[in-house]
Every structure is written in C-alpha cells, then in structure tokens.
C-alpha cells in the first residue's frame, strides 16, 4: 500500500469523468488499498479515484473516523439509482483546500456498486452517508462540491486561492 498524491483544485484532471472498471483485479485492489491509506493519512472520510489521478470509477468512504474501518465502503462503479428529499450540509473536500460551504443534496440515496471481491451491493443511505456518497460520486462525474454553489461564492474561493499562491511567491 502507498499514499498517493491528492490532486488540488484547479487541476484539470479533477474535471474528467471516470470510466467504468471492466475487470475487478489486482490492479483495482492496489488502487483501493492505496486510496484507503491516502484517505486516512489526509485525513478524510471519502476519496474518489479521480482525486489521486486515476480514471477508474472507484470510491472509498469511511463515515466514522473515530472507529476506522467499522463502516468502511470500497465501491467500484457506484451509481445512484434513487434520490429522495433534500438536506443542506457543510461540505469540505481534500481537493478543495481550506474551504467549506453549505451544499444542497438529496437526504436519501440508493447506490448500486460492486465490491473488490466482485459482489454487487446496494446501499440505502440517509443523512451524512448519503451526502458523502453523492460527494464522491460527483468526483467520478468530474464535479466538485464548489460546482454546486453560487458563482459568486466560487469566485470568492478562486480569488482566495490566487491570493494564497501570490503570497507564496
């Protein structure tokens, strides 16, 4: 296992849509294990393969950082098949440095995916887990949470980034 570099906004790779994994094999196992290690090291509660520069449709989530591994999800080719209700959640992202914002999401989702041991599963999630699943699946579709906020708030964040970059020169 290895810790991989997490890409940061505005890296154009983050805008690319991931492709379905055709074969769940040792390469995918390595990617998933590296992503888990990278997520915990960051630390975060979720990570999409696109965030570490992979074009594979893979996400890892651990919604309970206090008890690592107890609720860990390793999902291959996840798809949201149902959405219900709405919730506003303060989101942050390992690829969007030093910024959080309130984002409107579905309060409940049904996700179908494959596991690394080639089992097809369904996850019926509400609240925080539903938000985390939507956030990570958005990454696979080339979207960041800042794409779901107003243009004004997004511009404020971009100006903040420019200011930070200029101060480091």
Image: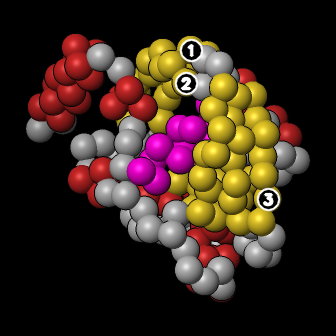
Mark 3 vs mark 1: in front: 3
Residue 92's x, y, as percent? 49, 29
Residue at x-position 76% and y-position 75%: 118
- Badge 3 or badge 1: first in the primary sequence: 1
Does the magenta portion include 169?
no
Q: Determine the CA span between mark 2 and mark 3.
A: 22 Å
Q: Determine the CA span between mark 3 and mark 1.
A: 27 Å
> As rendered, which of 71 and 106 lies closer to the eye?
106
Mark 2 residue element: strand
Residue at x-position 42% and y-position 51%: 141
Residue at x-position 30% and y-position 42%: 9
Question: Which label sits on residue 105?
Answer: 2
Q: Is residue 35 above or below residue 158?
A: below
Mark 1 crowd level (few <14, some 14–19, many ≥20, 10 Å Cα): some
> Mark 2 near mark 3, Cβ–Cβ under 8 Å?
no
> As rendered, which of 81 and 126 lies closer to the eye?
81
> Mark 1 near mark 2, Cβ–Cβ under 8 Å?
yes
Residue 12 appears in the rendering: yes
Q: Which image quarter holds the N terminus?
A: bottom right
Mark 1 residue element: strand
Residue 80's x, y, as percent? 61, 45
Name the residue beneath numbered marker 1: 88
Q: Which residues are magenta?
A: 131-141
Main SS class of the magenta portion in the image: helix
Name the residue beneath numbered marker 3: 121
Q: Quadrant of residue 166?
A: top left
Mark 3 residue element: strand
Judge from the rendering whether residue 71 lies leftward or rightward of residue 93; answer left or right. right
């Amino acid at each position: 296992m290895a810790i991989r570099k997490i890409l940061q906004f505005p890296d154009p790779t983050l805008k690319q849509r991931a492709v379905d994994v055709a074969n769940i094999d040792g390469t995918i196992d390595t990617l998933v294990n590296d992503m888990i290690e990278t997520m915990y090291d960051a630390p975060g509660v979720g990570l999409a393969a696109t965030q570490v520069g992979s074009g594979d449709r893979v996400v890892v989530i651990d919604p309970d950082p206090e008890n690592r591994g107890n609720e860990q999800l390793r999902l291959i080719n996840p798809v949201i098949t149902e959405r219900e209700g709405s919730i506003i959640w303060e989101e942050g992202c390992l690829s969007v440095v030093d910024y959080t914002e309130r984002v409107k999401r579905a309060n409940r989702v049904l996700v179908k995916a494959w596991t690394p041991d080639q089992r097809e599963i369904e996850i019926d999630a509400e609240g925080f887990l539903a938000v985390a699943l939507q956030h990570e699946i958005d990454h696979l579709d080339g979207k960041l949470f800042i794409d779901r906020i107003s243009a004004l708030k997004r511009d404020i964040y971009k100006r903040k980034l420019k200011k930070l970059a200029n101060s480091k020169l």
